[in-house]
Image (spheres, rainbow, N blue to C red):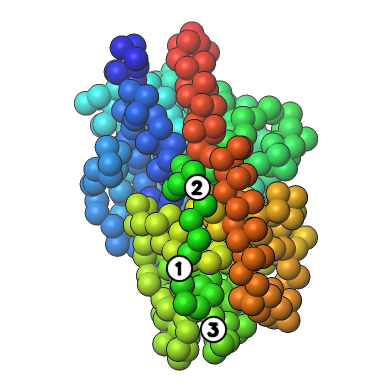
């Protein structure tokens, strides 16, 4: 690893990077392989530390604030602040590069890619683009269709400057091959195993868990409607999100005697808490395009802990669960979710069989050691390329 000790990676993230397990896992893999990793993030809410060392990851957060705007003013207002963040991030990256030069640029999300391309041109450094969602799909729910389509064209144009394209699933890989003619490396959001042996939970009541992004497309309203007051069922909800939505969840949990809201959960605690549950909840709204084709972290957290998962039938994640036998895929309705919860609550053997299947899948295929090899191969290949190519 002697040649890699001086290699540094700049990761660009348009989020505060507080609880993003994909970025964390990839950064840790690179650090253990001898690379230095710096994350340049956007803290819009001004809630996180400006500078932080997170297990060896050097983090700088820029506090460019985006006050909430209503109606048609929301889009240009956000665009203005995005441009302000990109300009400030560019200046900060140049300053950090003078102190210790960067050898690679690693972008997450399309809104960081123009910044990454500008830095690539400046430094002649290889550019990695790591995509988990299709940006144009996200904007279709908030922008007029013709305007949203512009982002598909922009994405195709910007991808020409990317040296290595990473995505999270076969369906995403096919999208980029069809839309932009780009080959990808699939690196799934797999986790390191908690244990190689199945360990049954020890709960007196059937315990259903969700820890992750707190947003309406995560169907927590559906879960609350079904689970509140359901006999011999406990629900535990944790994660981060917009303050207003969190307040609403806290209020709903406070009105129920069997739903607990635990707030933000540190990286190191997510899998430990997952292992204490009987099942993981991961029903995504099938009306959201990215949710329909997404592969959420919950799938892999559940498998790593030997826990079954409940997903939405007809989504890519639901198809995965049915194919691998790692949980239940149910229709997106209160009646279907209630039936699934009750059947799991009343059938310990079913829970254990699905949990064992989940752990077996993690042991044989869906684990981070398998995935991180591909990340290191990408960086080794980019390191050997002529500079500026």
- Residue 292 shown left or right of residue 237 in the figure: right
Q: In the image, is residue 141 above or below residue 43?
A: below
CA gap, disc 2 to disc 1? 15 Å
Query: Where, by quadrant of the figure, is residue 326 drawn?
Result: bottom right
Question: Mark 3 and 1 residues: CB-CB less than 8 Å, in contact?
Answer: no
Q: Position of residue 80 (x, y in %)?
A: 45, 54
| Residue identifier under label 1 | 202
| Residue identifier under label 3 | 232
CA gap, disc 3 to disc 1? 14 Å
Q: Which class describes the residues within 10 Å of circle 1: few (<14), some (14-19), or many (20+)? A: few
Element class at badge 2: loop
Q: Nearer the viewer, mark 3 or mark 1?
A: 1
Which of disc 1 and disc 3 is earlier in sequence? 1
Q: Nearer the viewer, residue 251 or 276?
A: 276
Question: Mark 2 and 1 residues: CB-CB less than 8 Å, in contact?
Answer: no
| Residue identifier under label 2 | 197
Question: Mark 3 and 2 residues: CB-CB less than 8 Å, in contact?
Answer: no
- Residue found 35% across the figure and 41% down from its top: 40
Q: Position of residue 242 (x, y in %)?
A: 44, 69
Residue farthest to the front, as pictured: 349
- Residue 319 shown left or right of residue 259 in the figure: right
Which of disc 2 and disc 3 is earlier in sequence? 2
Q: Position of residue 252 (x, y in %)?
A: 48, 85
């Amino acid at each position: 690893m002697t040649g890699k000790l001086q290699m540094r990676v700049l990761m660009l993230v348009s989020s505060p990077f507080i609880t993003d397990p994909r970025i964390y896992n990839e950064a840790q893999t690179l650090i253990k392989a001898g690379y230095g990793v710096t994350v340049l993030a956007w803290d819009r809410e001004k809630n996180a530390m400006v500078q932080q060392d997170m297990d060896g990851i050097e983090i700088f957060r820029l506090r460019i604030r985006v006050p909430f705007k209503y109606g048609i003013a929301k889009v240009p207002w956000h665009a203005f602040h995005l441009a302000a963040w990109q300009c400030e991030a560019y200046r900060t990256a140049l300053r950090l590069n003078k102190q210790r030069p960067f050898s690679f640029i690693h972008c997450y999300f399309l809104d960081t890619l123009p910044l990454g391309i500008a830095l690539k041109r400046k430094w002649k450094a290889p550019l990695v683009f790591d995509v988990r969602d299709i940006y144009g799909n996200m904007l279709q729910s908030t922008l007029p269709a013709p305007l949203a389509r512009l982002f598909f064209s922009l994405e195709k144009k910007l991808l020409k400057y990317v040296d290595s394209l990473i995505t999270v699933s076969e369906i995403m890989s096919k999208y980029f091959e069809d839309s932009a003619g780009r080959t990808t490396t699939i690196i799934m959001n797999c986790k390191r195993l908690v244990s190689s042996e199945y360990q049954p939970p020890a709960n007196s009541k059937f315990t259903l868990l969700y820890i992750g992004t707190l947003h309406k497309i995560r169907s927590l309203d559906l879960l609350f409607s079904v689970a509140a007051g359901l006999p011999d069922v406990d629900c535990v909800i944790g994660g981060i999100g917009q303050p207003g939505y969190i307040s609403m969840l806290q209020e709903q949990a406070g009105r129920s005697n069997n739903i607990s809201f635990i707030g933000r959960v540190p990286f190191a605690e997510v899998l430990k808490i997952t292992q204490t549950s009987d099942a993981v909840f991961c029903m995504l709204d099938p009306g959201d395009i990215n949710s329909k084709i997404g592969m959420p972290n919950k799938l892999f957290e559940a498998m790593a802990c030997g826990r079954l998962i409940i997903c939405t039938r007809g989504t890519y994640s639901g198809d995965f669960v049915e194919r691998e036998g790692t949980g239940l895929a149910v229709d997106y309705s209160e009646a279907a979710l209630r039936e699934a919860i009750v059947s799991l609550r009343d059938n310990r053997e079913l829970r254990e069989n699905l949990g064992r299947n989940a752990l077996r899948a993690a042991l044989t295929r869906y684990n981070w050691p398998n995935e991180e090899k591909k990340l290191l191969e990408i960086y080794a290949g980019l390191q050997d390329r002529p500079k500026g190519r």
